[in-house]
Amino acid sequence: MIIYSNKLFSNLKNDVKIISKQTSIAIKSIKNLDKTTKDKMEKTAVEGHNYKIFQALRDMVNHSHPDKYIISNENKELANLSKKVEIKLIKEIISKIGNDTFSNVNLDVVSKIIGKKIEFKANNSRYLDTYVGVYLHHYLGITRAEASRPEFWNSLVMSDSLILEYCIFRSQFGRTKPQKVKLSYFIVEQEQNLIIQHLLARPWWSVELTRNGGDYSTSIDSSALGSMYTRRWGTMSLMHNKLFALSSSKLLLETDWPKKKGKYPSGRRYAIQNLPPIMNNFAATNNFDKTFSINEPDNLDAYDNWNKKRYKEFKDKINLLFGPEDIQIKQSSINKGTKILKDIARNSISTEPVYGPQKFL
């Protein structure tokens, strides 16, 4: 795999800035029109915006680039990645979703692989991300340090037109109208944006943060929380504590959240949005390390052993896959951690007094 430097994408970044500015001006100019006309013209503006960005990305994939990243012994993560990743295998994972252009997609194959029916609906995107996240996690075989490198994920998107076309397809999947895309869905410069926006890195990180050692079932269960959970909780430093991560997903999954009045009635959605600051406050004012201490030993050889054992050819059942056996948290510890988090949420002072997290529990 070729690893490209961020310098390669500087011209693309400038082009997208110009495209975005033009789109913003176009949308602003129609804001006072009647709703039907405005919606129609806005849809046209967004489609044009997306087409220009997609075309710029396609041009990059289809042209040779002399400005390759120079891999040196000092940069061990990238040197290792350039040798480790098999693009052929990644393409096979993506090919199960659709054809070369994703113009005629049949998701029955992926539905059978993960045991969940995937339809073209917004709330089904989580199942597609589950498939991509777990399969990428297993077949890439990379560490958190390696996965924190934007150059790697940027280069993965640019490594083959099939992978890029999947990301383009995913950016619009399940949408009732065109979704205005950002360059950071495909190309990022900062580690935080990998978890929040990048369409390949985000599902990988979702799996990494919620797996329990080699067991992917906790990640598959957590996928029901959707990408909002990854975006809102994944960037919290607390999530790098495996006990906290598993306890938080269990809290959000298993609590019977009552419906909320308004545009978004889901109580779980409200909790996903509003509990992170409360948890951060808890960590800042209490002995978090003691409360969420992990007594299970860390297996320092886990990644080396995993890379020897993990599959090098595609397996058509998600439950056959496994992660590195680094830290396995006992269920009793997760149950205890979940109870602690529930008490924190219940006793918190909400920013929304009429319907705060403490009202849920």
Image (cartoon, grey):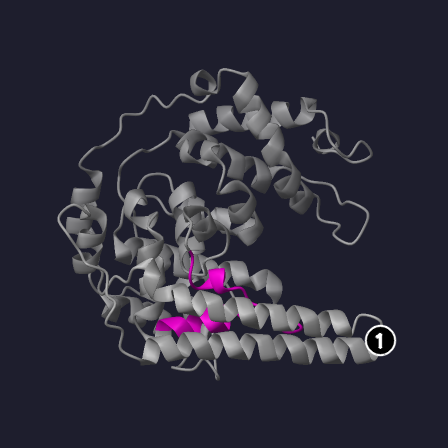
Residue at the spot x=73%, y=80% of the render? 41
Q: Is residue 179 visible?
A: no
Residue 52, position as x, y percentages in the image: 52, 78
Looking at the picture, does residue 5 appear above or below residue 164? above
Residue 48: say if magenta: no
Residue at the spot x=34%, y=76% of the render? 61
**Quadrant of the image for the N terminus?**
bottom left
Residue 353, position as x, y percentages in the image: 80, 31
**Quadrant of the image for the C terminus?**
top right
Q: Could you say which is closer to the camera, residue 105 or residue 192?
A: 192
Q: Secondary structure at mark 1?
A: loop
Instruction: Count all numbered tags in the image, as a single digit.
Output: 1
Decide if residue 214 is on the left or right side of residue 167.
Answer: left
Q: Which residue is mark 1?
A: 33
- Please report the bounds of the magenta region as a residue range: 163-188
Residue 228, position as x, y percentages in the image: 57, 50
Residue at the spot x=48%, y=20% of the render? 288
Residue lying at the far left of the rendered structure: 73
Q: Quadrant of residue 290?
A: top left
Residue at the spot x=42%, y=49% of the render? 190
Q: Quadrant of residue 123?
A: bottom right
Mark 1 is surrounded, within 10 Å at the Cα level, by few (under 14), some (14 to 19) or many (20 or more) other residues, namely few
Residue 171: say if magenta: yes
Residue 21, position as x, y percentages in the image: 61, 68
